[in-house]
Amino acid sequence: MTAHRRFIPIFSGVAFGVLAVVTLKGCIFNRSEIAFSVTIPDAVKASARWIEVAAYPERCPTPEELSGPLPNAGMQSRVAMAVDEKNPPAFGRLPKGTYGFAASIRNSSCGVLAAGCTVAQLPGQSSVDIQLAPLSTAAGTCEDGITCAYAQCVPAVNSGDPSAGRGCSMRLVGAGPLGAPLSDDVQISPPSVVATNDGFLIAYREYLSQSAQAKFTIVPIDPGGGIRTLHDYPLADRCAGVEESDGIAFSFSKENAQGLLAISRKPCENGNVGGLEIFPTDSSGSIVKSAFTASGSATITLTGHSLAIVNSSKQMLAYGFDQEARVAEIDTAALTFTNNDAAVPYATYATSATSASIARSSSALALLASVPPSSIVDAGADAKADATAEAGSLDPRIALTFTSATTALDKLPKSIASTGKFGTLALQDGRLFVVRQSIVPGRAAEFEAYDVGSTKAVVTDTLSTSIGNGETEAIDLALAQNRAFFAIGQPKSVTVLVYDHATTNPTFLREVHLPSDPRIPTFVGKFRDGGVAIAATDSRVIVTWTTGKTLQANDVLGGYAVFACTNP
């Protein structure tokens, strides 16, 4: 065997260089580092295409298990990539303990060429060498009609392929952890996710209250469920001792192949002003510029659904401004707020608001806010509809403003109110879905569907999970393929519910309980009070989650799972 070693900085994850020896270095426990080298036998170098490394608590897989694809049962964390990958993904963070680190080399058809495993104690060892033994035959080769991507046999991206999630089978394509956190006690924002032209982008923020250290991370996911290069970006001028728990607004224009992120900055007692930071990104998650708009002493809050595309040069932003829910327009070239045609820089559509979200299509505009029941306001001078909140009700309320896409900001109608602590929305053409946490015991959530031009819901229904229990802590919604996809986070559980015929008569299709699938990292069952996000395309559905609002000792930051779903 030949040998070559290459080390990379902390948090960068796994490094794959030459075919002989692969070296990785990552953050494992309390920010300590450990380096792994994987020695590839000369006999398989010529056919080696993919390499995967996985961690198993307490043990190595048996020799029989290593004779095929690395087993998903009991897997704590996994990374995979091409053997010549120059920009590797992060391996992720592991709690303190003893682990078997298994590795395998696969050919272009996912056939396993060589495998091996080494046991290590974390923390305690500074390096681990994984020796691989060649197999007599390449086990685990993908079946006809299935492609090999990132060392896994997955449905083809082509939605016409009968194996690619026909009937929205929600067949698992890939899953894994997000990046390594800054620290055990870091605050994590809810994740945001958007579909790009060739996969997905996940974004989340980390913030350390004591030191005021903050960054945000963009995680590119390919259609095969593999992580590409993670991007970490520092956030400057943060305040110590404040709470940064709101979301990251994220949108992506497939027409322009460009995304836009908006991140709030809280005001500080030392005089640093609050405001809004805007970052354009490409489909890889790379950012080369940014802009900041100050809000003085006012606090801005955002959600993952706070941005909506209008055209190639304009987007709309729904945001909390102290206790108001506002909507304004953004010039995507100048990265600043615009003065719109109605000659008002923004409109307030709810007061005492704790969140603000937006959805827009060519025919409709929808705005959502979480507010106390007495705070539903007339958003425009020409309001016609009445809010439906009962006078004197003590239930938390969701305020919805639904109108034509051409409505001027100073002509927004009065909001429609319904019960719920929080909710979100999605719009496809003229059909709007609103999903909200239910205050009724035994119900995970409730949703309504509206058609543009009407203030009355045309469909109402409840969402329940068969395995998840406890109060819903997070919820998200995506529309694609005439289907509605709901992601629900409950204690120790993340569930996806799929509804068919979304634009006519929504009908329950199937439920996917992530902790029940041994191929998905087991830490999804440690979900506590973090966030969830979901996005869908014509062939894929991705759900991502963060474990908690503030991480505790041994917490994994979060993860993701990609599923196949196509028509018919």
Image: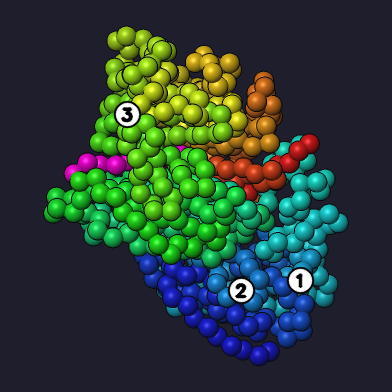
Magenta highlight range: 297-306
What element does badge 2 sit on? loop
Indicate which disc residue 107 carries: 1
Percent coordinates x, y for residue 37 in the rendering: 56, 79
Q: Are marks 2 and 1 in contact (CB under 8 Å)?
A: no
What element does badge 3 sit on? strand
Residue at position x 35%, y 21% in the image:
380
Give the residue furthest to the bottom: 2
As shown in the figure, which amino acid type bears the numbered disc 1? Asn
Total marks placed: 3
**For the residues marked 2 and 3, what is the alpha-carbon distance in whole angstroms?**
49 Å
Viewer-proximal residue among 358 and 42: 358
Viewer-proximal residue among 50 and 538: 538
What element does badge 1 sit on? loop
**For the residues marked 2 and 1, what is the alpha-carbon distance in whole angstroms?**
15 Å
As shown in the figure, which amino acid type bears the numbered disc 2? Glu
Disc 3 target residue: 348
Q: Is residue 192 magenta?
A: no
Q: Residues within 10 Å of mark 3 (few under 14, many from 20)?
A: many
As shown in the figure, which amino acid type bears the numbered disc 3? Thr
Which one is in front in this view, the residue at disc 1 or the one at disc 3?
3
Give the residue furthest to the top: 391
Image side of residue 81 versus residue 323, left or right: right
Which one is in front in this view, the residue at disc 2 or the one at disc 3?
3
Residue 220 visible to the viewer: no
Residue 410 visible to the viewer: yes
**For the residues marked 1 and 3, what is the alpha-carbon distance in whole angstroms?**
58 Å
Indicate which disc residue 85 carries: 2
Percent coordinates x, y for residue 303 in the rendering: 41, 40
Residue at position x 45%, y 62% in the image:
287
